[in-house]
Image: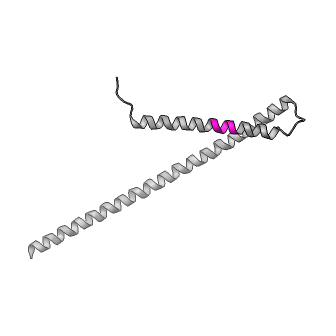
Amino acid sequence: MSGPPRQGTDDALANEVEGYLLWQARIAEAEQRAREFTGPLEWLTTAQREEIEHRYTADALARSRADLERIAARCRSLRAEYEGRYRELKRRCVAVALAVCAGCTALATLLLLL
């Protein structure tokens, strides 16, 4: 036995499953909306109805994919921005801590000399 799986593996698997389920829900929603769109068009033949539903679904999924890609790009951008801000904040905190330590050391040295 190789032991229990690492947490990162579990998280990645959970994210993949969640993404798959969300995309399947998006497909079902697009197909439902396509059927609702063609429903009132009683004069369409079966082949025409199927073609319109297919194109409507494909268009809706292409738009959804573009939206998701745009959102993912924005998430990556925000993450990089926040990581940069965090690094800068961490540098400042370390600098202040070092300055306080240096000041305390200088004060202690001065008090010892007096």
Depicted 107 relative to depicted 14: above or below: below
Q: Residue visible at 82% across and 38% down? A: 38
Residue 88 drawn at (x, y percent): 39, 59
Q: Magenta span covers which residues?
A: 24-29
- Predominant SS of the magenta segment: helix
Queried whether the magenta region covers residue 30, the answer comes back as no
Residue 34 drawn at (x, y percent): 76, 38
Q: Residue visible at 10% across and 72% down? A: 112
Where residue 114 sits, quadrant-wise, is bottom left
Depicted 80 relative to depicted 24: above or below: below
Q: Residue furthest bottom?
A: 114
Residue 42 drawn at (x, y percent): 88, 36
Q: Is residue 35 left or right of residue 19?
A: right
Q: Residue furthest right?
A: 43
Depicted 99 relative to depicted 42: above or below: below
Q: Residue visible at 78% across and 40% down? A: 36
Q: Is residue 2 left or right of residue 20?
A: left
Picture quarter with the N terminus = top left
Q: Residue furthest top?
A: 1
Depicted 81 relative to depicted 29: above or below: below
